[in-house]
Image: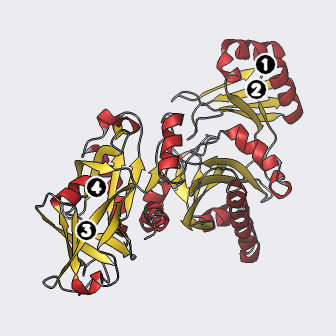
């Protein structure tokens, strides 16, 4: 049932409903808003029309006392949904976006980049606000943040209850804070944990059907181990365990006794030849960061488009609990003379159909087989990750195709970016942005 709220001044906690509605409920009920609740007296009104309430544009009018609004920190200028039972009234949804710890940067102007998520608002309604862990008042169970005022189409400051559902958008919050928020929301904070690349590798290797789709990977320890890995594999990639978007990467290819290095750790790519093992040893002695939270991995011979390698970003999201869907697929083609496919490195995006047509000279039936293989692999991976003791609802899965069309799992991002989709297919981009809001409303019970 959709509602609009009128506030009247009163020093008592009262909710006024159309007379027909009050026949279903007790004279006192528990009123819930987010994770806050209080007992309020129910008053019938013959003046309130028992009409509307079937959609956002035709809400039912109700009245709340000013004390009840202040007690629950309700933003009364929004359109909400309401659920009734004999002893309980829930108004919502109340959805929180957990941002980073740098709360001083979160101004209405900064929050504009989140506004495109609200194209779906009429299907959800309610209070959607952004906050930092530093803005939580645990003593009073309130949070200071910014909510989206849909009628004014702008972000405004306010004080709110702890939300019933949280969409986590940052992974630098204190572990204790995350644990408390998970407890307060009864586990309804999704994207609750960010795993590292090697944790993912170990998880996949335990699954027989997935293990064949991951390249050989080790955590770097010392030069002797790295040298042995290079000797065995020939083409390797070194990458940080916790960074993404092509940052910190270095590719080494062994040819006879020489080593070709492509170093992408800085904005300016450095390419050079190391003539022998001694020069390789000197290179690692001068770059000891490669032994601090780094992986060494088999570097695959990827399928190419006009000589440039590409990989596939598959966005997987939940619409319902345990119900994954593929929200979008883009292929990221490396810039000319680059081996890194990230768009921020100068690459560009194509659809999967375009990429397959350019890179594999096969018929439509074979291309469809490759596509089905990619889809199946991503769904299977999501189902496997769901068995971990965490709440996931959004992944950016990076899949590589080798020259023979075999699919390989490269990375899984819990906090993916969607720049390529925004440039390539804006409608798909918007659908990706909307889905977590719809899922959050579902978790909130609306």
Q: Which residue is mark 2?
A: 220
| Residue 378 appears in view | yes
Q: Residues within 10 Å of mark 3 (few under 14, many from 20)?
A: some
Residue at 57 percent of width and 29 percent of height: 269
Spatial CA distance of label 4 from label 1 is: 57 Å
Instruction: Classify residue 217 by image quadrant.
Output: top right
Left or right relative to 67: residue 393? right
Figure check: 86 above or below 345: below
What is the secondary structure assignment of the residue under circle 3?
Answer: strand
The residue drawn where x is 10% and y is 61% is 9
Whether 347 is drawn above or below 38: the answer is above
Residue 298 shown left or right of residue 343 in the figure = right
**Looking at this view, is 311 or 273 the one in front?**
311
Disc 4 target residue: 72
Q: Secondary structure at mark 2?
A: loop
For discs 3 and 2, the disc positioned in front in the rendered view: 3
Q: How dense is the environment of label 2, judged by Cα within 10 Å: few (below 14), some, or many (20 and up)?
A: many
Confirm or deny contact between disc 1 and disc 2 (CB under 8 A). yes
Considering the image in quadrants, where does the N terminus appear?
bottom left
Mark closest to the chain's N terminus, 1 or 3: 3
Residue on which the image places disc 1 = 222
Which residue in the structure is indicated by mark 3?
Answer: 41
């Amino acid at each position: 049932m959709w509602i609009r709220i009128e506030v009247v001044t009163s020093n008592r906690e009262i909710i006024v409903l159309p007379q027909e509605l009050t026949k279903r409920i007790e004279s006192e009920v528990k009123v819930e808003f987010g994770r806050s609740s209080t007992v309020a007296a129910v008053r019938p009104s013959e003046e309130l029309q028992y009409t509307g309430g079937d959609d956002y544009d035709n809400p039912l009018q109700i009245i709340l006392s000013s004390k009840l609004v202040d007690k629950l920190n309700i933003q009364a200028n929004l359109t909400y949904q309401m659920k009734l039972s004999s002893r309980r009234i829930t108004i919502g949804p109340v959805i929180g976006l957990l941002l980073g710890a740098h709360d001083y940067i979160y101004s209405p102007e900064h929050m504009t980049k989140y506004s495109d998520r609200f194209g779906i608002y009429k299907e959800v309604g309610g209070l959607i606000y952004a906050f930092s862990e530093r803005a939580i008042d645990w003593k009073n169970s309130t949070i200071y943040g910014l909510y989206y005022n849909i009628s004014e189409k702008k972000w405004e400051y306010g004080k709110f209850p702890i939300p019933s559902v949280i969409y986590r958008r940052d992974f630098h919050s204190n572990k204790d804070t995350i644990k408390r928020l998970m407890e307060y929301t009864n586990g309804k904070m999704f994207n609750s944990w960010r795993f590292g690349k090697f944790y993912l590798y170990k998880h996949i290797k335990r699954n027989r059907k997935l293990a064949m789709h991951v390249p050989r990977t080790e955590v770097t320890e010392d030069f002797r181990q790295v040298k042995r890995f290079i000797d065995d594999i020939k083409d390797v990639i070194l990458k940080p365990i916790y960074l993404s978007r092509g940052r910190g990467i270095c590719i080494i290819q062994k040819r006879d006794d020489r080593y070709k290095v492509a170093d992408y750790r800085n904005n300016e790519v450095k390419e050079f030849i190391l003539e022998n093992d001694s020069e390789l040893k000197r290179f690692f002695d001068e770059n000891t960061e490669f032994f601090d939270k780094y992986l060494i991995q088999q570097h695959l011979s990827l399928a190419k488009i006009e000589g440039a390698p590409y990989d596939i970003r598959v966005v997987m999201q939940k619409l319902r609990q345990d119900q994954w869907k593929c929200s979008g697929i883009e292929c990221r083609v490396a810039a000319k003379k680059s081996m890194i496919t990230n768009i921020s490195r100068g690459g560009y995006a194509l659809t999967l159909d375009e990429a397959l047509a350019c890179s594999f000279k096969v018929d439509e039936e074979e291309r469809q087989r490759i596509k089905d293989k990619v889809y199946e692999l991503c769904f299977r991976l999501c189902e496997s990750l769901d068995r971990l003791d965490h709440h996931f609802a959004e992944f950016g899965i990076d899949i590589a195709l080798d020259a023979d069309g075999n699919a390989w799992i490269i990375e899984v991002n819990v906090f993916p970016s969607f720049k390529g989709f925004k440039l390539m297919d804006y409608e798909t981009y918007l659908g990706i942005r909307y889905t977590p809001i719809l899922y959050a409303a579902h978790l909130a019970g609306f």
